[in-house]
Each structure stands twice: as structure tokens, then as C-alpha cells.
């Protein structure tokens, strides 16, 4: 979008404040600058002079002027106010470089005294945006203006002379960091970019642009989410721009108006669309949860991301499809169900990836996280062993554990009620797709025809999808064609075979993705009541323009053209409704619609889509013929421009995009040959059968226009472009019936680095996603709006007369008349004032000048107040100190007295305790001495000592008698215990004797059984030997004997429906050679019989000897006998089958429709039936 000239800016009075009154700060600069603290605190000025370069810009106005705190609270622009001097340049491309601070235009401190009588305007230096030749925007200060030229100073102190019309006006400082771009006085590219970066550097990633929410990806976790924030937005305690606020508005409008809502999220890859959609779903689940279905809805995200997202060069988790999630609500406002619709899955990524990118996440998650049993069942290898995955040399993503993600996906599949059996089938299909890429071909002739190499890959694919290996080989290397009434088989060359293999892989994965979405929808809709009210979340690709744009970008940009038209129509509807509701004089704004570009795509029969489908129907159509046809038929269209070779360009709403038609026709046809569809339908697994039936059902749909038939393929199905156009029309119809809410996601840099803001990249996205279009549309109306109350509070003190008693509307009108604002520059509504772009700047300039003077008066008065208060404070402090010190001394004296008294009491108690202890010790010693003396005296005068000795001797004898009695009792107990043990041993001997007798009886029974089995084997061997001898004799007899046999079996021959006829003799002569071959075969069978019979006989005899004990061997004869019997039965069965095969071979060798062979057939049948019975 070209930048038109802007009206000259109004005075910026904040910049002209004297140095004495500017507050301390240290501004730095990167692209637009490294901004300081976003929340600038208010400061009461308590000295006569205020330090230079202070951070604070808020001023407090006393009495009649009012408090600046209150003014900021009433401001429609928010409270983030920063001086223009602190506003840095926008031009630096390197975000890490820091430009020097902008030189202060204010005079030095000594020059700013109260005697300074210089006019305010003379000190004023205008600030504007200037675009350098490199495309960067710099914030320049206008030093002088002469005619059409201006002299400007850049932040790096360079002085330039430029054309005045090349300068773009900058906004007042009060508008820095506003949360709504519609509140900017000057809506231009550099102002929008500066405002977005100002907020982004402070982690305020959400900004409103009228009805649109702009979300800049921070590439890091920001503290803006969680239950606390959800509760704050739910209770309207937080009104900052946020996804929660948009979602809350959608819920409230749905309930209030009973109208379905939609949240449309767009942006380029890596801008954060998927995360934004998940945040919106989390808020819906928090507000509408309770039934449990919200948990299932949230669990669909891991599944869709695993199967539909991939790592690209721009984004580690890029959605390669568009989706619409429609969430239904009950009458009580609770979630009752959901439905998911997907658009344009990038199937080519399954078989082809650019270096450094990955295929879909699920392949790597399956290879890394599948359990051992599943890996063995699917014959699953590591990701590096599959060609589809190894061609990009990228197998992992930094910070992502694929094995853990696979477990999350499996849990999510359980939550959405996909059975374990179906999950196994899904993993089998994924593995089959990977193995398909490993199938290789061998060239078999000079025409480059190929055959499939029968290796592990082919066998594994056939096993996984449940088809025959030979059928799979034919489907990949040949093609059936119908010529007239005949079917012919055409061999494929290497290129055709490779395309067929890749087409099968892409179709299986695409059908699997659609089947998964279908199963999820069944799970989310079963048993759920719907009231018809819903909120739809559209997560769709944004406008894309790369160095090389192909069919995918063609469809994506077409979809964005449709969405942009819907966006424009809705935007104007809201604007006009607000103007009409406020009763202003409003003339409908005409805007440049993108209908011409949409007509270029959709016009019939000469639109881009029609010509693409038409060229796709021709068997000989190529990408070059398609490009030439476009240039021939569309060269007169203003939105189309032909380029060299296969390229053409389309002028979209966001800019011109050049497309390369290489691969357009193939991707649009997206043909899967009927042979491959029939192969899938013949599979034993239910999923391939389901895929085939769906593809056949689609091919039976009627198609407008000629049908494309090539190589016998039934391609009566919709082309990709036509199908996408149909889906897009259905989507637009659904969105038209809803109230839309727009979220535009922006990627600040291509390095996915937090804190890095690339100006050119952001500007390109703002243009592509239509944010700048919103700005352009809003500028044609009245973008600045303020209620009567806020306007009168903010600017009412500027009136020369007292209007405090008047109503806000009268005050507002009086302000407008006093400042001579032209009537066409504003409109007075019922509740608001509407201003054209830049008009609020005049009022802000006058207001700032007035506040500047008030500030100087306040500073002098407050300095005097502070000094007087300080003197009174010092006097009071001296008096207070004297009282405090006296009181402190008295309290300290009282404490000392109390300590002395306590010490005396403690001493008395301690001395008393010590005296008591000494007395007790002396008293105890006296008692001990007395007891010792008294005892000695008693013993001295006691009775005869001999009597005492006699008494003690008698006592000892009684003790000895007691000891002997105890020993005798112990011996008796031991005897009883030994007798009991002897009885137990005897009982055990009886039991062992009985068991021995049982073993002997069983041994005799086993000997009888072995003898009977041996007799049976001998009989069977004799039977087989007799059969062999009879067969040998029957083949060795001469011609006369055979004739005799034929006469004997004449009765059998009569049972047949045919006879030997006259060819009997001829067949006898021709059967000589087969008979000799048959004799040799029979001889070998007889030799084998003799050998086997000898071996089995010896083994049986040996086991009998071991059983009878004649031979010692460390083995179980019963077990070995059973095993020998099993071997004999197996050999017998195999020998019988070979005898029958020999009969069939001999029959084929000698079967010339003769009577002798028929006789042999009868004879062999009778003999075999007799022998096998």
C-alpha cells in the first residue's frame, strides 16, 4: 500500500517543557526503541525545582484544574504516557543494536527560569515519521520548514532536507501504547508499528484494531493465562484486549441475542493461530463446562495436531490444514456437543519434505513411542529407516519428546472413544504408508518398464493392509485399460510406478485423517442435546506470499480473498450501526472492494478455477498449456498479469503474488487409479475397505463439465479446486449466519526468538491479514470517539468562562466552538463526540500548554509549602526528642531497680539451698556410722556359732535330694519322646511300602501297553510295505498284464461317463516313458519306507529295554515313547500325502485320455482308501 501524504501534525507541547520541569529518564532505542517501564508512576513534586530527565510525565493539578490522576483515568487512550523525546526510532533492523538517545531539544537548566518569556510555539519542534531509502521508518524532528521542503534531525543527529509531503505525522505522547489502534489520531503505518512494538516489549501481546484483535506471538510463556485471568474476564474485572475478552463477548452475545457466533483466527504459519484457538477453547470450556464433553473437545487438539501438524522451516508446529470447530451450547449455556470440519490437508507432505522440515508429527511419535508389542506386530522400525521420513534429514524437534507426545495422543484417542481395535488399525495404516515409501522397482526392459521388487517392504505393506502380495505388485506396476469391449494391461514405467505408489500413500493418509475427524465428530455429538446456538472457531491459514508459490498458496489466498470480503462487509455494518445509533450526519463510505479479484477466481467460464478444471480434463494438458491459456483469456483483467514460462501473477487485496503453475494440474486432479481403489476394497482390514467405499461414493457424484478419463481410471469426481470452492462457499454461508469476531495473529520474527521485533516482517503481515485495511477504512470515518462526560472532564478547564453547572454536552459544544474546530471535522452524537483523524491533537496541544503553566505555578507553591513544613517539622522534632529522651531515661532507671531487687532475691534463695544440702549430707553420714557400730555390738554379743553351722548342713542335703528327682523326671520324658518318634517312622514305612506296590502295578500296565503299541506299529508297517510292493508290481507289469487289469476293472470303467475308445493302443505306447519315471519314484519311496521302518523299530525296541530296566539311560521312557508315536504319525501322514502326490504326477504324465490311465486312477483310489482307513 502506498503511503499518501498526511496533513501536517499539530503542536506537541509535552516536548517543549523546560528542563527544570522534565523528569529523570534514560531512554534508549532499538528499532522503535527499548522502552522503559510501561507504568509510569505519579509523583508529588515537593521541591522548587524538578530534576531534569525524570521518568514521570504525569502531573497533579490542584483545585480548579483538577487532578491529573483523574484525567488519566478518564482518558480514552489509557494511562501509558511517555514523552515524545523518549520515543525512539523505528528504522533499526537489528533489534540488538541500541541507537543513541535522542538529543534533548529543551534548553539547559540555567536558561529556564521564571523570567523565560520565549513563546511556547517557538520552542516547539514538530515530530514526524520519515522513511529512509532502505524502507525503515525514523522518528524525525522538524527543525525548519521552507515552502515544500523541511529540515529534519534524525535520532543519530543527522540533519536532512526532505520534501514536506514525505513526512508522516506522529501521534501525541499520550497515545503511546494505546490498547486500541482506532484511538490513534494519525493512523499510518509507522504509528501502528510503533504502538504494537511498544506494547510487545512490555509483554502486552494483544492490541485491538477496532473490531479486530491483533495477537503478536511472544515465542515464550507470558503471564496472561490461567484460572485467575479467566475469572477476571468472566467477572469483567479486566478489560484489556485478550482472547478471553473476545471469547467472553461471543458467549454473552450468543446468550443475549440468541445468535450464533464465530471467532475467525487467521495469520501466517508460526503466528500462533493454533495456540490462540486452544486458548479460546479453554475459555469456552471453563465457562460452559460441567457436562464432561468439554474435556473431550479439548482432547481433540493433540489428535488433530499429531495428524495434521508438521515442522516447517518457519514453524515447529505448523497446521497443514484449516479447521472449523463448531461448539454447541444447551439452553443453560453449557457445552452440549461439538463438530469439526477440516479444509485442504497438505497431502503432498506425506511423500515429500523439504530439507530441514518434517512430515506429520504422528509418524515420528509412532516410531519413537510405540510399545514393543506394537512394534513387533507392525514390524515398525526407526524413523531414519523410512525413505518418506529420511529424505529431509530431520527427525526431531528441539524441546519436544515424541515418545511422550505419542502417549498423550493415545490417551486422547481413548477419551474420544476410539476403540483399541480401531487404534491398532490406525497405527497399521500409518505404518503401511511408511513402508510404501520403501517399495522399490526394477527396470525390466529398454522401455523403462518396471516390476515391483519383492522385498520386506512389499510383504509388510500387504500384511498391514490385508491384501494379496501379487495383487499389490500388479496394482503398483501395471494399469488396466479398457479399449472398446476389451481390457488390456499396460506396464508402467519407473516414473508412473513411483507416482502410483505415492498417490496410494497420500490417499490412504488423507482418508485416514478424514476418518479420524468423522470418529471424533461421532464421539462429540452422540447423546448431546443441541439448541441451535453455537460458537464456531475458525483456525485457517492466512495470506501467503513466498518466493515460489504453488497450488496450495493459490487455494489459500483465494480463501483469504473470500474472508476479507466477509470482513469488510461486517466492518462497515458495525460502523454504520454505531453512526446511526448516535444520530450523526453520516454518508455511506465507499471503499475499494475485492470483488474484481474474486471474479477473477470464480467467473465462469473464463475464471482461474474454471480454466484450471477445464485444462485438468484434457489428457494431454500440461502446466505450460494451462499457463498459456490463462495468459490468452485473462490478459485484459486488471487483477491478472502474465509472466514468463509457467508463471502468472494475481493482484490480491494484500498485494501482488506470483504463482508457478508447476504441479497445478496434477494436484488439482489428485487422481487415484481405479486399480488402487479396487486393491483397497479387496483388503481384509476394514479401514482400507472404508476408504475405498468413500472414494467410490465420491466418484459417483455428478460433475459439471467434461469428464477426465485416462488409463481406465474412473475419475468422475470433483477436482481439488472445485471441492475446496464448495467447502469455502458452505463455510461463508455458515459465517454469514453468525456474528463474527476477528483475531489476526502476527509473527514478529522468522527466528522464533522472544523479544525480537522485525519491522518489515510485521508490516507485511499487517497488510496481508488486513489490519492496515481496517485502519484505512476507519480513517474514512470518525476513528476518534469520546463520550460527552469524558470530553468535558478532560478539556472543560480550558474554557474561559465557568461552566461547572452546565451539562457535559453543552460543555463539549462550547469547547469545540472556542477552539474553532471546523464542523466537517467532527460530529456530535447522542452519547459521543466523533472526530476526524488528527483533530484531537489540537485540543491536546492546548491542554498540554495550559498544564505546563499550571505545573510551574504548582512547583513554586509546593516548594514554599515544603520548606515551611520542614521548618515546623524540625521544631516539633526537637521538642518531641526531649520528651522521648526523658521518658526513655526514666524507664531505664526503673528497669535497673527491678534488676537489683531480683538479684537480691535470687542470692537469698541460692544460699538457703546450699545450706540445706550441707546439713542433709552431715546427717546422713552420722546415721551410717551409728548403724555400723550398733551392728558390730550385736554380732559381738550374739549366740553359739556352731548351732548356726548345723542348721546350714541340713539345708544342703535337702537340696541334693531335690536335684536327683528332677534328673529322673527328665530321663522319663526323653524315653516317651523316643517311643513316639519310633511309632511315626513305622507308619511312614507302611505308607512307602503301599506306594511301592502301586508303582509296580503301574509299571506292569505300561509294559503291556508298550507291547500292544509295538504290535500295532508292526501291523501298520506291514500294511505300508504291502501297499508299496503292490504299487511296484502294478507299474512293472507288461502290456499284457495291464490289459488283463483293464479287463478285471471293466465294471469300474462302466461307472464313468466316458470310455477308452479307439485311442487305447496309442496311449499305451505313449505311456512307456511316464511308467519308467513312475518306477523310479516308487523305488525311492520304497527305500525310504525301509529306512524309516528300521529306524522306528530300533527306537521302539530301545525304549522297551529302557522301560524294562535292561538298559540304563537318563531319560523318561514314557515321554520318549509318546514323542516317538507323534513322530511316527507325522511321518505316516506326510508319507501318505507324498504317495497321493506321486499318483497325481504319474496320472498327469501318462494321461492322454487313455483307458490305462483311467484304470490306474481307479486302482489308486481304491488302494489309498483301503490303506488310509
Image (spheres, rainbow, N blue to C red):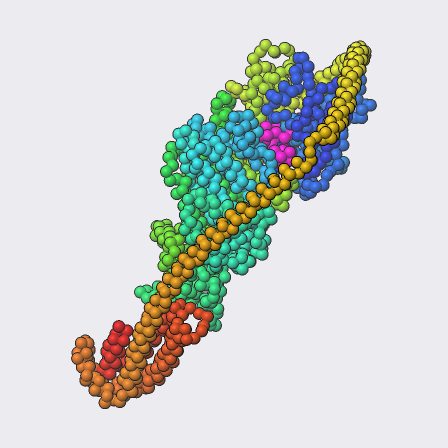
Start-end of magenta stretch: 176-204
**Spot occupied by residue 747 in the image (x, y as percentages of width and height):** 59, 41
Residue 862 figure quarter: top right
Q: Locate residue 968 relative to residue 880 in the image: left or right.
A: left
- Residue lying at the far right in this picture: please name it: 110
Could you say which is closer to the camera, residue 628 or residue 976?
976
Residue in the picture at 53% in, 43% down:
543
**Spot occupied by residue 41 in the image (x, y as percentages of width and height):** 68, 25
Could you say which is closer to the camera, residue 997 or residue 18?
997
Q: Locate residue 748 relative to residue 116 in the image: left or right.
A: left
Residue in the picture at 22% in, 85% down:
1045
Q: Is residue 199 magenta?
A: yes
Q: Locate residue 934 relative to residue 751 in the image: left or right.
A: right
Residue 1170 figure quarter: bottom left
Which image quadrant: the C terminus?
Answer: bottom left
Residue in the picture at 63% in, 45% down:
751
Which image quadrant: the N terminus?
Answer: top right
Amino acid at each position: 500500500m502506498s503511503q499518501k501524504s498526511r496533513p501536517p501534525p499539530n503542536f506537541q507541547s509535552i516536548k517543549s517543557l523546560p528542563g527544570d520541569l522534565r523528569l529523570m529518564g534514560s531512554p534508549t532505542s532499538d528499532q522503535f526503541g527499548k522502552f522503559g517501564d510501561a507504568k509510569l508512576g505519579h509523583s508529588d513534586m515537593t521541591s522548587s525545582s524538578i530534576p531534569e530527565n525524570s521518568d514521570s510525565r504525569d502531573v497533579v493539578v490542584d483545585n480548579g484544574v483538577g487532578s491529573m490522576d483523574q484525567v488519566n483515568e478518564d482518558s480514552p487512550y489509557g494511562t501509558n504516557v511517555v514523552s515524545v523525546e523518549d520515543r525512539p526510532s523505528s528504522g533499526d533492523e537489528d533489534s540488538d543494536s541500541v541507537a543513541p538517545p535522542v538529543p534533548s531539544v529543551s534548553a539547559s537548566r540555567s536558561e529556564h527560569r521564571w523570567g523565560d518569556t520565549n513563546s511556547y510555539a517557538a520552542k516547539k519542534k514538530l515530530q514526524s515519521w520519515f522513511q529512509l531509502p532502505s524502507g525503515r521508518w525514523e522518528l524525525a524532528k522538524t527543525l525548519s520548514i521552507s515552502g515544500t521542503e523541511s529540515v529534519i534531525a534524525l535520532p543519530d543527529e543527522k540533519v536532512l532536507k526532505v520534501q514536506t509531503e514525505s513526512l508522516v505525522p506522529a501521534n501525541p505522547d499520550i497515545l503511546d501504547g494505546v490498547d486500541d489502534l482506532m484511538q490513534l489520531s494519525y493512523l499510518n503505518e509507522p504509528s501502528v508499528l510503533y504502538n504494537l512494538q511498544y506494547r510487545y516489549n512490555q509483554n502486552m501481546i494483544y492490541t485491538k484494531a477496532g473490531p479486530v484483535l491483533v495477537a503478536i506471538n511472544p515465542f515464550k510463556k507470558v503471564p496472561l493465562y490461567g484460572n485467575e485471568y479467566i475469572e477476571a474476564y468472566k467477572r469483567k474485572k479486566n478489560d484489556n484486549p485478550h482472547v478471553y475478552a473476545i471469547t467472553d463477548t461471543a458467549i454473552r452475545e450468543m446468550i443475549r441475542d440468541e445468535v450464533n457466533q464465530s471467532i475467525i483466527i487467521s495469520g501466517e504459519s508460526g503466528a500462533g493461530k493454533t495456540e490462540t484457538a486452544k486458548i479460546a477453547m479453554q475459555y469456552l470450556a471453563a465457562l460452559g463446562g460441567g457436562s464432561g464433553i468439554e474435556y473431550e473437545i479439548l482432547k481433540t487438539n493433540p489428535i488433530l495436531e499429531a495428524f495434521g501438524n508438521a515442522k516447517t522451516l518457519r514453524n515447529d508446529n505448523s497446521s497443514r490444514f484449516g479447521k472449523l470447530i463448531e461448539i454447541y451450547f444447551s439452553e443453560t449455556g453449557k457445552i452440549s456437543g461439538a463438530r469439526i470440519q477440516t479444509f485442504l490437508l497438505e497431502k503432498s507432505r506425506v511423500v515429500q519434505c523439504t530439507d530441514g522440515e518434517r512430515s506429520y508429527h504422528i509418524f515420528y511419535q509412532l516410531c519413537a513411542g510405540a510399545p514393543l508389542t506394537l512394534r513387533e506386530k507392525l514390524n515398525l522400525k526407526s524413523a531414519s529407516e523410512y525413505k518418506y521420513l529420511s529424505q529431509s534429514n530431520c527427525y526431531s524437534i528441539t524441546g519436544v519428546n515424541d515418545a511422550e507426545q505419542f502417549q498423550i495422543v493415545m490417551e486422547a484417542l481413548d477419551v474420544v472413544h476410539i476403540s483399541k481395535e480401531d487404534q491398532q488399525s490406525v497405527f497399521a495404516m500409518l505404518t503401511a504408508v511408511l513402508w510404501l515409501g520403501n517399495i522399490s522397482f526394477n527396470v525390466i526392459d529398454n522401455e523403462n518398464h518396471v516390476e515391483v521388487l519383492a522385498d520386506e517392504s512389499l510383504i509388510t505393506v500387504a500384511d498391514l493392509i490385508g491384501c494379496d502380495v501379487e495383487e499389490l505388485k500388479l496394482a503398483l506396476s501395471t494399469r488396466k485399460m479398457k479399449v472398446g469391449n476389451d481390457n488390456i494391461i499396460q506396464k508402467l514405467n519407473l516414473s508412473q510406478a513411483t507416482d502410483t505408489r505415492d498417490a496410494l500413500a497420500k490417499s490412504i493418509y488423507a482418508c485416514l485423517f478424514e476418518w479420524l475427524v468423522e470418529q471424533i465428530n461421532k464421539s462429540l455429538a452422540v447423546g448431546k442435546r443441541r439448541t441451535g446456538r453455537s460458537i464456531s472457531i475458525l483456525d485457517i491459514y492466512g495470506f501467503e506470499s513466498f518466493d515460489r508459490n504453488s497450488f496450495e498458496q493459490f487455494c489459500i489466498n483465494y480463501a483469504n480473498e473470500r474472508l476479507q470480503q466477509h470482513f469488510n462487509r461486517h466492518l462497515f455494518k458495525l460502523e454504520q450501526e454505531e453512526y446511526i445509533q448516535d444520530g450523526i450526519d453520516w454518508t455511506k463510505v465507499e471503499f475499494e472492494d475485492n470483488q474484481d479479484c474474486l471474479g477473477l477466481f470464480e467467473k465462469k467460464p473464463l475464471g482461474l478455477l474454471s480454466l484450471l478444471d477445464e485444462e485438468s480434463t484434457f489428457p494431454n494438458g500440461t502446466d505450460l498449456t494451462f499457463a498459456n491459456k490463462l495468459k490468452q483469456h485473462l490478459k485484459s483483467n486488471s487483477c491478472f498479469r502474465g509472466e514468463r514460462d509457467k508463471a502468472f501473477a494475481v493482484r490480491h487485496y494484500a498485494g501482488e503474488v506470483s504463482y508457478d503453475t508447476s504441479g497445478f494440474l496434477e494436484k488439482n486432479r489428485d487422481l487415484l487409479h481405479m486399480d488402487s481403489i479396487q486393491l483397497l476394497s479387496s483388503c481384509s482390514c476394514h479401514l482400507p475397505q472404508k476408504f475405498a467405499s468413500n472414494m467410490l461414493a465420491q466418484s459417483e457424484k455428478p460433475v459439471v463439465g467434461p469428464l477426465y478419463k485416462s488409463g481406465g481410471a474412473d475419475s468422475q469426481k470433483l477436482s481439488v479446486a472445485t471441492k475446496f470452492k464448495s467447502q469455502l462457499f458452505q463455510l461463508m454461508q455458515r459465517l454469514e449466519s453468525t456474528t463474527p469476531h476477528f483475531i489476526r495473529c502476527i509473527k514478529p520474527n522468522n527466528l522464533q526468538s522472544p523479544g525480537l521485533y522485525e519491522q518489515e516482517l510485521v508490516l507485511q503481515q499487517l497488510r496481508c491479514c488486513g489490519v492496515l485495511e481496517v485502519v484505512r477504512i476507519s480513517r474514512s470515518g470518525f476513528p476518534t470517539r469520546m463520550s460527552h462526560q469524558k470530553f468535558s472532564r478532560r478539556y472543560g478547564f480550558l474554557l474561559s468562562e465557568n461552566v461547572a453547572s452546565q451539562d457535559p454536552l453543552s460543555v463539549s459544544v462550547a469547547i469545540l466552538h472556542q477552539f474553532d474546530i471546523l464542523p466537517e471535522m467532527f460530529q456530535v452524537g447522542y452519547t459521543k463526540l466523533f472526530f476526524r483523524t488528527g483533530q484531537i491533537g489540537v485540543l491536546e496541544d492546548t491542554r498540554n500548554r495550559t498544564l505546563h503553566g499550571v505545573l510551574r505555578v504548582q512547583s513554586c507553591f509546593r516548594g514554599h509549602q515544603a520548606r515551611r513544613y520542614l521548618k515546623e517539622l524540625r521544631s516539633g522534632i526537637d521538642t518531641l526528642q526531649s520528651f522521648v529522651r526523658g521518658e526513655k531515661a526514666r524507664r531505664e532507671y526503673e528497669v535497673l531497680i527491678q534488676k537489683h531487687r531480683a538479684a537480691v532475691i535470687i542470692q537469698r534463695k541460692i544460699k538457703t539451698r546450699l545450706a540445706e544440702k550441707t546439713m542433709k549430707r552431715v546427717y546422713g553420714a552420722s546415721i551410717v556410722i551409728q548403724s555400723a557400730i550398733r551392728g558390730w555390738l550385736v554380732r559381738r554379743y550374739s549366740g553359739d556359732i556352731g548351732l548356726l553351722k548345723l542348721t546350714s548342713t541340713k539345708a544342703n542335703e535337702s537340696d541334693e535330694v531335690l536335684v536327683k528327682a528332677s534328673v529322673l523326671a527328665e530321663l522319663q520324658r526323653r524315653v516317651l519322646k523316643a517311643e513316639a518318634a519310633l511309632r511315626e517312622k513305622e507308619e511312614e514305612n507302611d505308607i512307602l511300602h503301599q506306594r511301592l506296590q502301586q508303582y509296580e502295578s503301574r509299571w506292569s500296565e505300561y509294559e503291556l501297553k508298550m507291547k500292544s503299541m509295538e504290535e500295532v506299529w508292526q501291523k501298520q508297517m506291514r500294511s505300508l510295505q504291502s501297499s508299496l510292493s503292490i504299487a511296484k508290481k502294478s507299474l512293472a507289469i507288461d502290456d499284457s498284464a495291464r490289459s488283463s487289469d483293464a479287463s478285471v476293472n471293466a465294471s469300474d470303467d462302466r461307472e464313468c461317463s466316458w470310455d477308452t475308445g479307439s485311442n487305447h493302443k496309442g496311449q499305451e505306447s505313449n505311456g512307456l516313458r511316464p511308467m519308467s519315471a513312475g518306477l523310479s519314484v516308487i523305488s525311492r519311496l520304497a527305500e525310504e519306507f525301509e529306512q524309516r521302518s528300521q529306524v522306528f523299530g530300533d527306537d521302539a525296541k530301545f525304549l522297551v529295554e529302557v522301560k524294562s530296566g535292561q538298559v540304563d539311560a537318563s531319560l523318561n521312557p514314557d515321554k520318549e515313547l509318546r514323542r516317538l508315536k507323534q513322530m511316527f504319525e507325522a511321518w505316516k501322514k506326510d508319507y501318505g500325502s507324498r504317495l497321493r502326490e506321486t499318483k497325481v504326477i504319474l496320472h498327469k504324465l501318462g494321461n492322454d485320455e487313455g483307458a490305462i490311465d483311467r484304470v490306474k486312477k481307479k486302482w489308486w483310489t481304491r488302494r489309498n482308501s483301503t490303506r488310509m482307513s
